[in-house]
Image (cartoon, rainbow, N blue to C red):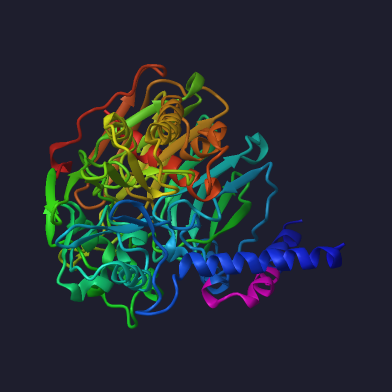
Amino acid sequence: MGGADRPIAFRALLATALLAATVLLDGAGEGDALAVEELAAGVYVHRGAQLPLDAPGHDDIANIGFIVGSRCVAVIDTGGSVRIGRALRAAIRRRTALPICYVINTHVHVDHVLGNRAFKDDGASFVGHAALAPAIVRSRPYFVKEYAQDLDAPAEPDEVIGPDRLVDAELTLDLGQRQLTLHAWPTAHTDCDLTVYDQKTSTLWTGDLLFVERLPALDGSLVGWIDAVDRLAEHHVKLVVPGHGPPTAHPGEAFARERVYLESLLQGVRRELSAGKSQQDAMLHVGADQKSGWLLWQEVHPRNVARAYEELEWEK
Amino acid sequence: MTALRACAVACGAILLVAAGSSLADDQQPSGAMWDFLRAKYYGNRPMGLVDETYMSLEVPSNTPDPAATPLTLRFADDPAARIKRVRVFVDNNPSPLVATFELGDPPVTQIDLRVRIDRFTSVRAVAEKSDGGLEMRSAWVKASGGCSVPPSAAAGGTLGEVRLRPGEDAKSLLVSIRHPNSSGFQIDPRTGDNIPAHYISHIRIEAGGRALLDAETGISVSENPTLRIGSDQSLPAPVTVDAVDSVTQAHFTASTSSPRTAATELPAPANGRR
């Protein structure tokens, strides 16, 4: 049995390996370039893998990319390691020689910011939510300690680059015949969520305000996140690039699906709290009926319940 | 019988060490630390390993949050061997004794709280029975950083605010206390300075005018301490909670005179506010 299966398994393995090679590395050249897809004219996305944060390849789990104007390039998120950041930079250099003028971070999480270091010598402005600056300061010691292997050795705090241009509410960046509108959100997925809208192609980069297929991970405010989803869903845009999962031309469905999960978390934890139940009880009971169709449920859901419980314990 | 149980503890420990020998050093149960704690708090008294029906300890081995790991203790109400005192230990925390609970009336059958886990460790509960016997349960938790993680950005609100949520038929009470419960091992990332230890040192809960539970608590309890007390019987009204601040000695109090009314909050004393 095992013997008969082996050639098939081997072939499958080989195919997977070849696929992985073509997806990750777009040939050699100026360092290994990350594979990117031109989603709309001048809008390039590299799709992160749907892996846990502690798995091998954990530095390449977020959707990252860049947008090219007539004057310069804006990078949107840089991946979970300096290596991924460099591979993204190489992918940009394969497509344009225009200068990189902005590196935009959609929030503070490692999988979106650790590649910033790769763009330090480009003279780009690092742009983020006003709350991203303190969030980076707060997270630096932890990133350097826990993600040292994803930084250049020896890992130093100043490799974790924070924003030098802050967005309080809204900011428009001009890339030359192309305007990006950046919007800073009240606490939702994190306390420093920023969305990027490309007016030219009607493409919205949501950062981690939208998860597709991968279970949303709460690190800010559940109530705030639901509000943000409702407001985002009102915008009529052609294309949406979520923080994780496939880009979509049907954002309404994706927002609705995420909202169902978040709402069930909210109602479930409120119910447990009003019945005087413990956090352990809440983790056992809440949301179990929502499991189907989401990736990484076991890794993410219990923590979401714990976070929601800690937030709603003090709800007015 | 007790000798047999004591042996079971020792032999169990040896087996655990043997099983863990292929793991990195920090993944091994800290036998030396527990030997020290055991001698300090219990001398040479024999200690049994009770079965789950008498006492159980639940902690998720892969905790969702090292700084706020939920922990549940359940006790059988055995009138012949009532539990008078329970200590909770996290062996490898800088301050291993999490809390000492003195149990009163009606008998408490469940305690829930959230604790900090600093690195891979055994978590233990040791019960002292009315006949003087000792029983222990333990669990292994894989987590690190819970004592040094910066205060959460979401933390805030009014220091010393207390919320009470009675459960069904008033058989339980969920107590939530707004307090940073700073461990003394956290760094303020903006200044690089150490944040001094500042925590809830004592929680007393009375039901119907009698002590239900009296707890000495320390820095291993999480930010915004939560304590849930369960019983097989309805808790006689009124249930009152009195928590003491380690630095100011301020008392934060709340009471629920009727078990099914909404949470009642009394203002914290002025000197307890930031």
Q: Position of residue A57 (x, y in %)?
A: 48, 66
* Number of numbered labels in the structure image: 0
**Residue at screen point 52% across, 29% down:** B106
Residue B194 rendering spot, x and y as whole percentages:
22, 66
Query: Is B48 covered by the magenta stretch?
Result: no
For residue A284, side relative to residue A130 (left or right): right
| Residue nearer the viewer, A222 or A73 | A73
Above or below residue B247? Residue B111 is: above
Does B203 sit left or right of A1 as displayed?
A: left
In the current view of this chain or complex, which residue is farthest to the right? A1
- From the viewer's perspective, tell me whether residue B166 is left or right of residue A175: right
Image quadrant where one finds the C terminus of chain A: top left
- In the depicted structure, whether residue B47 falls above or below residue A21: above
Q: Is residue B20 magenta?
A: yes
Q: Which residues are magenta?
A: B13-26
Question: Can you say whether B40 is above or below A210 in the image?
Answer: below
Most prominent secondary structure in the magenta stretch? helix
Residue B195 showing in the rendered view = no
Q: Is residue B152 left or right of residue B90?
A: left
Identity of the residue drawn at 34% across and 19% down: B262
Give the percent coordinates (x, y) of residue B234. Answer: 51, 22
Question: Residue B125: x percent and y percent?
Answer: 55, 53
In percent of the image, x 45 and y 21: which residue is there?
A: B236
Quarter of the figure with the N terminus of chain A: bottom right
Specify whether residue B66 is in view. Answer: yes
For this rendering, which residue is in front, A18 or A120?
A18
Q: In this orientation, which residue lies closer to the viewer: A220 or B180?
A: A220
